[in-house]
Amino acid sequence: MKIAVIGCSHGELDIIYSDIAAIEQRDGIVIDLVIICGDFQAVRNANDLQCMAVPVKYRRLQTFHKYYRSEVMAPKLTLFVGGNHEASNYMQTLGFGGWVAHNIFYMGYASVVTFRGVRIAGISGIHKRFDSDCGHFERLPFDENTKRSVFHMRQSDVYKLMQLNDESSAQTQALDVMISHDWPLNIHSCGDVQYLLRRKKYFLQEVQENRLGNPLLEPLVRHLKPRHWFSAHLHVKFEALVNHTEDLSIQTRFLALDKVLPNRQYLDIIDIEPTLPSSSDCLEYDAEWLAVLQSTDKLLSIEKKCSVPHVMSKLHSVTESDINRVKELFNNDFKIPTNFEMSEPVLKDSDCDPQRLKNYTNPQTVEFCKRLGITDPMSAIIESLKPLPNPDQISISDDEEDEDEALYGKSDENPNKRHKPDDNIDGGDLFFVDKGGVDEPKGDSRDATKAQNSKPNEDIIQTNASTSGMASENAETLTKRQIKRRADKLKRQTELRQLEKMDANQRKDTKTEMSKQMKKIVAKKRHQSRREMIIDRLEWIKANLPMKSPNSEIDVISLDQLSINTESTH
């Protein structure tokens, strides 16, 4: 099977398909599949540019919108992963993958699919250490921070891929292709480093310090051992060969490509023989990957910080029985439905959210999650944004009225018989009666009365006189009771304020102490993690020698040569 591998496409689909057609005609071959390694830029209209982290001068609509509206059909089945320059609002709605247009499939945050017997895995985004342990918390409207953090790779997605059985497992098919936008950490050491530095001189310091690439992808290289690994991002063509065994029987061929520009090496044709024969000519789900999604569903987080097991952990690894349950659920039919449809807010000739303020689900993801029984991240985000009920709101429903009648008996239907002049009425805080007459209402009622009319009208004067007459017998008693009640209330309020003040001071002291302890713990863990990561990198480099030939001599940078202060806690 012939695969056209593309570097960073930056929305230039017309150029890509035109160049592929020219190659087919020139060489007399047929390309079966196109793989794009990120910076795809699925921009549906100019409003999506608000959600793409690129300098203003690069904010161009390009050509994808024609494929989205089916004005043009992609001539080749196309798979792609997300990079760091994407219309992330659209990609978020397809977290588990899906069709962004007819014949163009996005791999989601991470996923595994098969095509004509070739097993293909993909993971989107680039590495940013401070966001790697976050959940997928970003939601519209984006600010300048979330516009970028949304495409930062998450450890939780790497962990899911690490639950796949490795190449030596007899349960599942080996991984033929891995796609990422970022390079795996130190993959350059398994290739021609001098050639890379001649092309990209500013990589020198990162190469010397063994930190060129993405550390989250390094364990995937060692564990999954794919036959091919395709990347982009650094805008240079580079090849490397990773040897996983001493007898060189298991190898990973790494290929990175440039971006789509004239006279750049952005395209290469790779011929891959399927590991297993397949009669299907359609893109298909991977049964083991679906079982992994089920087992890790509880790890899904839409919070800024979340807890994820260590990437080497196997807490959620799937068994053969788990895979068989998925096969039964799908009736052994894993064909990915061609169910692309334009979805809100961007429809054929309308955009119901031009400022990109609202969050939307995608029908493909909703259907997929419902079938597999897992959580749709965007549905969870939308649900979390719904306002919570107000616990202080007073309900006046009929049910409560019926409940009051059952407890206290039905009230007298004649309002004139409810209170007799001789009834002992406690006005509480509603009104105050003394020998001189009736005072004005308290608080807002008094202010509202004055606002409506500064002079009392005749009806109010008559009402006051009537009220004064009714309460004249108990005026002295009510006055004493009222004064006592107000004094008690004032005392309670004063005590409450003092308690709240003491509690606030105590909480502040506790919070300060906890913050100091937490900083010490974080610094200690950071120091330990950094030391382990550096040692792990060096061990991995040594374990993968030689690069291309068993007789090759390679200078490996030692821990001492890195000039890193291992006692520092930064």
Image (cartoon, rainbow, N blue to C red):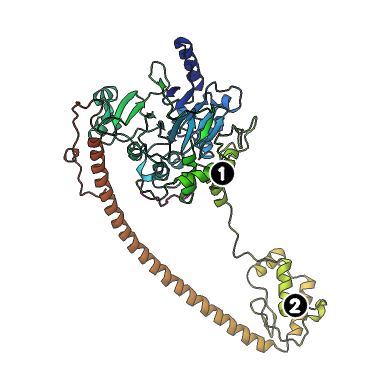
Q: Secondary structure at mark 1?
A: helix
Q: Is residue 73 visible?
A: yes
Q: Is residue 350 magenta?
A: no
Where's residue 96, x and y in %?
50, 40
Looking at the rendered structure, the kind of residue marked 1 is: Leu
Residue 489 on image: x %, y %: 56, 79
Q: Is residue 164 left or right of residue 70?
A: left
Residue at the spot of label 1: 329
Q: Is residue 136 visible?
A: no
Residue at the (58%, 38%) spot, across then down: 364
Q: Position of residue 247 (x, y in %)?
A: 26, 31
399 and 478: which one is in front?
A: 399
Q: Quadrant of the N terminus?
A: top left
What residue do we see at 71% from left, 75% from top? 404
For label 2, the crowd category at 10 Å Cα-Cα, with few meaning under 14, some 14 to 19 and many 20 or more, is some
Which numbered disc, 2 or 1, marks the residue that appears first in the sequence? 1
Left or right placement of residue 221 versus residue 498 in this view: left
- On the image, numbered disc 2 is attached to which residue? 464
**Measured from the top left, where is residue 149 in percent x and y?**
43, 41
Residues in magenta, as a range: 302-310
